[in-house]
Amino acid sequence: MRFDRNRIADVTFGASALVTGLAVAAIFGFLFLFALPVFTGGQGLSILSGVWNPGRGQFGILPMLAASLCVALSALALGWPLALGLCCGIRGFLPRPVGRLLLMLLRGMTAFPTVVYGFAAIFLLVPIMREGLGRGSGLSWATAGLVLSLVILPTMALVMDAGMRQTERRLRLTGAALGFTREQTLTHLVLPACRKNLLAAAALGFGRAIGDTLIPLMLAGNAPQWPSAAWDSIRTLTAHIGLVLATDSNSAAYGSVFVAGCLLLLVNVTVQLCLRSLLRTGETA
Amino acid sequence: MSRPATYFVRTAVWGAALIVPLALAALTGVLVTRGAGALDANLFFGGVPALQAMTGRIPVWDGIWPACAGTLSLLGLTMLLALGPGIGCGIYLATSTASRAKALLGFAVDLLAGIPSIVMGLFGFTMLLMLRRTIAPNAGASLLLAACCLALLVLPVLVSTTRAALESLPRQLHLTGAAMGLGKWQTLRHILLPSSARGILGGILLAAGRAAEDTAVIMLTGAVANAGLPAGVFSRFEALPFTIFYRSSQYRDALELEQGFATTLVLLVLSLSLLAGASKLQRTLEQRWQGIRDDD
């Protein structure tokens, strides 16, 4: 008897697709399931209050959410212009060999483990920040933001570069017809035309920045307080999850961990929806 | 009128082109200058003869060999778990016709790719809690749990590189199979997979690199500072990234700190060589089909 190989192959690939889909569903399902008792367990919405004081039974995680947003946005504010600058350089503002070197550097940076960035920054940047800011321990919002901008930079730059390369190929003739130099074509035609791509790069970078654990955990100081100044020690949602589960001591704090996980998942969904709408409309244009 | 914009961009370009390589050079410079001195057999085996240490006959307490072995076995187990679903799902997405299910699956893969690694670790933790409540009251964090979570983390990498490798093949190649009267599976097996093998292999290396460097997942699912060589899939283990994280705050003397720096160099070399392998494979795939590809 002969098996129908086409059929077997179809079933196998369909099954692996199903496994992938189910895994995603399971991740969302489990985390929401575990976060639910926090809201229904009598405390109501107190988990979303602004005070974290386990000693007095207050487990508000809003300060951590604020810290996550602050660190991610500041990393984005630093990293996005740098990424854009590098891309413009690669696509025409810098001599070709330099551009090629930069591209290689960016590709290499994607493989840099974040824990390595963190380790190097503890011994290089933290003392500098401690002296430079003149207050605090050097483990601060500013330190984490600086290093994080370097971490998210290659992802953003490579997305931008891919988009700009395509657009440039399309607009090269237009630029030549207008008598533009390569630089002018880039600033006046290519950059405006790939605005959506640049925004998508920012969304992607933001997602990376808010999801990173090791940099804030190692460099931001981890004090659960509202961020108010660049030299403040702060604790992000990701670092919070790591700290609470690693210390393994206060089971009452566990609930906040699952809520933090859900918040991060929601941020991820939002980012992916943004990316989807940005890139899809960008393709048809 | 056009001048200021160009000048502005040019300043930004030069600024970025100076700042980024300098920052990177400073960070790696610190690692190399402070860690290179400790890069020797002592770093790995801590005074134990290499052969006995590698076979596990004499336990290594002061070296990073257990962490290296932990990372390697973690990598092996992760890839074992992720390869099937990852490549299968990639093939499914690349070969099936457009449908609602396919669009949904594409979005699910994107979502999976965006999930922060600490949340993946948290998912592993919830699985552990579930297991304890239901079928296995004694379940603990282990190599297998960490590998499962890491497999989920690298799954989207495998899916998207496999899909991209298959979709980057020229369309004629897809038609060739039909023209020769081959079925869907035969086309895939004899034409499409062999011609995109390098791309898929590159994706595997890329995924391995991602698994090797991740710290957040294993931090929550079983990595510890002192476990010795991994004793089995149900035991706790050491891993290079976790060792680095641990050493960054817990070092007793200057030598341990120096070894911490050297450990980062070891991990860096591992990740960079995985990336180099991946991009070399993918570049040869691109070159092979350049020119034949229809650009529409």
Image (tube, coloured by chain):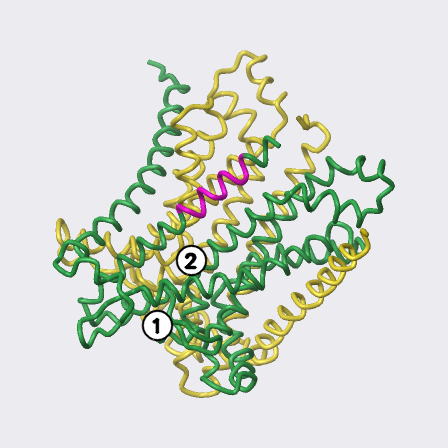
Chain colours: A green, B yellow
Helix, strand or loop status at disc 2:
helix
Can you identify the residue that label 2 sits on?
A: A211
For badge 1, the amino acid type reads: Ala
Q: Is residue A271 magenta?
A: yes
Residue name at image x 44 percent, y 42 percent:
A273
Query: What percent of the width, then of the height, locates residue B265?
Result: 55, 70
Residue stretch rendered in magenta on the structure? A269-280
Q: Which mark is residue B149?
A: none
For badge 2, the amino acid type reads: Gly
| Chain hosting mark 1 | B
Can you identify the residue that label 1 sits on?
A: B225
| Chain hosting mark 2 | A
Left or right side of A11 for B51: right
Left or right side of A84 for B211: left
Residue name at image x 59 percent, y 58 percent:
A80
Seen in the picture, residue A223 relative to B6 is either above or below; the reply is below
Question: Foreground: A131 or B73?
Answer: A131
